[in-house]
């Protein structure tokens, strides 16, 4: 104390500095950070597609005494409900004791779809000793990252008679995996001198699925027939059933701790399950007088379209149904509601320092990151939250001791990204983006900090308190 000069004291009092959450946390809180990560890793492994994330979320909700809600059901204070939209998005909510028209709904919106390689509708062929499935990738990927890694196949097939069959191959220890071929360096001079966009083209992302010829001299596509016969035996499928299938190739790796100190987690699909899981558990765990709701939606990675994406009327309808069931005017409810649009942001990476503006980039382990605006080159396409609402949220976080930071995705004139925030804000709901910083976002295996994951969970608890 005594060795501090007046200027040093004043600087400490007046200036702002980010805090590393591992450093700021007490011993007990540090333990809580590591414990919480275990549940998250289990969720990741169970939930590699939106369908699986939806089912895993429902299972967790049921464990906590939540029951299914359908439009028109009566509701009362204390009810704990989940609403499933076509098996691909899910909303969990608790009805609070405060009057809905004055207090609104505390909403957290996140997404459970992730970039991947989807199988086409007429995909199966054989060529030169190999059978392949043709694909069309989903979301913004660097295509070259998806070659030469073990892949699993996940999804659903609706058979000719209307039966739905779930497929999940490549996750269990005894399962085979799948693969996208790359070129050997010995023949890769031309490939490697080209643009990274063209290292592998969309039509070269064919998934290797077989190599055993069917033992019949009279058949021409013998390897294709072997694959078809296995699909028929295991799933009752014929080739025509691919027409009504949704199959995705996703990385076959499980979530793992990264680093000697286990501070980080590597996994497929942190974007955006690292926000969806805390949103879900915050609603499941939280006894609060507010009506709270977490939306885990689909299709964010391709523009939030379709009847399972956030632009679908279904979410607005649900909130209106909740309002009607509680005798509240929906317009008043919306106007009083608040939303954290929870999606990941880019963590500052010193290996690629030139694309970030360090003062306003999210620093790993400094907590969940609030983005006032997304977009790029003039904030185009962004929600750009109001200072008043940020001030309100900031106060909630301070009261609960949440370690958090603000962030911008990259330099002003370089790329950018959108979130679901603007669609919710359009409903006349105060909304701001808040989410976990990610290293190598959209890669088959992304990295996050356990401190940021737990900070996100704590931020949601504070927002709902
Ligand atoms: Mn996202
Ligand atoms: Mn994304």
Image (spheres, rainbow, N blue to C red):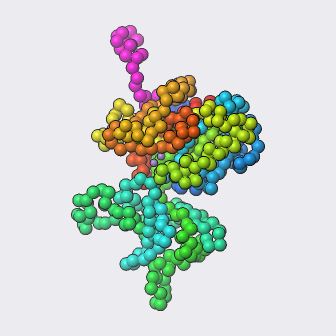
Quarter the C terminus occupies: top right
**Residue toward you, 91 or 312:** 312
Which range is magenta?
1-24
Q: How many marks?
A: 0
Would you place residue 133 above or below residue 146 in this image? Answer: below
**Residue toward you, 117 or 25:** 117
> How far across and how far down the image is residue 119, in percent?
48, 65
Q: Check residue 261 for magenta coloring.
A: no
Q: Residue furthest bottom?
A: 218
> How far across and how far down the image is residue 22, in percent?
46, 33
**Residue toward you, 176 or 369:** 369
Residue located 71% across and 49% down the image: 70
| Left or right of 126 in this view: 90 | right
Q: Quadrant of residue 463?
A: top right
Residue located 60% across and 48% down the image: 313
Would you place residue 206 above or below residue 440 in this image? Answer: below
Residue located 47% across and 87% down the image: 219
Q: Is residue 162 among what the camera can see?
A: yes
Q: Is residue 409 among what the camera can see?
A: no
> How far across and how far down the image is residue 115, in percent?
46, 54
Residue located 44% across and 65% down the image: 135
**Residue toward you, 47 or 259:** 47
Would you place residue 72 above or below residue 464 in this image? Answer: below
| Left or right of 70 in this view: 201 | left
> How far across and how far down the image is residue 256, in percent?
47, 49
Quarter the N terminus occupies: top left
Q: Check residue 20 for magenta coloring.
A: yes
């Amino acid at each position: 104390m005594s060795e501090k000069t007046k200027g040093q004291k004043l600087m400490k009092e007046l200036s702002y500095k980010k805090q590393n959450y591992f450093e700021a946390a007490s011993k007990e809180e540090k333990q809580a950070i590591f414990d919480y990560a275990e549940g998250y890793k289990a969720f990741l492994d169970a939930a590699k597609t939106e369908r699986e994330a939806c089912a895993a979320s429902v299972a967790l909700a049921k464990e906590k005494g939540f029951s299914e809600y359908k439009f028109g059901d009566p509701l009362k204070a204390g009810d704990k409900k989940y609403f499933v939209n076509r098996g691909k998005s899910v909303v969990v909510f608790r009805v609070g004791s405060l009057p809905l028209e004055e207090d609104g709904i505390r909403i957290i919106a996140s997404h459970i779809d992730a970039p991947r390689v989807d199988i086409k509708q007429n995909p199966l062929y054989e060529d030169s000793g190999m059978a392949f499935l043709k694909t069309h990738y989903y979301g913004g990927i660097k295509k070259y990252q998806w070659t030469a890694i073990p892949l699993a196949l996940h999804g659903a097939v609706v058979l000719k008679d209307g039966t739905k069959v779930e497929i999940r191959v490549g996750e269990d220890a005894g399962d085979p995996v799948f693969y996208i071929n790359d070129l050997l360096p010995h023949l890769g001079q031309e490939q490697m001198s080209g643009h990274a966009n063209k290292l592998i083209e969309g039509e070269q992302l064919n998934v290797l699925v077989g190599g055993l010829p069917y033992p019949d001299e009279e058949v021409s596509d013998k390897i294709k027939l072997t694959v078809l016969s296995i699909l028929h035996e295991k799933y009752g499928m014929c080739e025509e059933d691919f027409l009504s299938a949704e199959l995705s190739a996703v990385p076959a790796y499980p979530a793992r701790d990264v680093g000697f100190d286990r501070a980080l987690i590597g996994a497929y699909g942190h974007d955006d399950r690292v926000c969806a899981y805390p949103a879900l558990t915050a609603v499941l765990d939280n006894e609060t007088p507010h009506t709270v709701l977490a939306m885990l939606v689909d299709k964010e990675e391709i523009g939030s379209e379709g009847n399972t994406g956030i632009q679908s009327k279904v979410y607005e309808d649900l909130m209106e149904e909740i309002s009607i069931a509680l005798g509240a005017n929906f317009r008043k409810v919306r106007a009083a509601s608040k939303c954290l649009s929870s999606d990941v942001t880019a963590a500052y990476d010193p290996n690629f320092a030139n694309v970030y503006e360090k003062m306003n980039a999210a620093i790993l382990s400094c907590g969940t990151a609030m983005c006032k605006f997304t977009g790029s080159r003039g904030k185009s396409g962004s929600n750009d939250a109001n200072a008043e609402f940020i001030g309100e949220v900031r106060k909630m976080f301070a009261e609960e001791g949440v370690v958090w930071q603000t962030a911008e995705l990259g330099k002003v004139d370089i790329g950018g990204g959108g979130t679901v925030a603007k669609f919710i804000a359009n409903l006349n709901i105060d909304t701001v983006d808040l989410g976990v910083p990610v290293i190598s976002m959209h890669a088959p295996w992304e990295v996050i900090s356990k401190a940021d994951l737990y900070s996100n969970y704590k931020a949601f608890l504070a927002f709902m308190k």
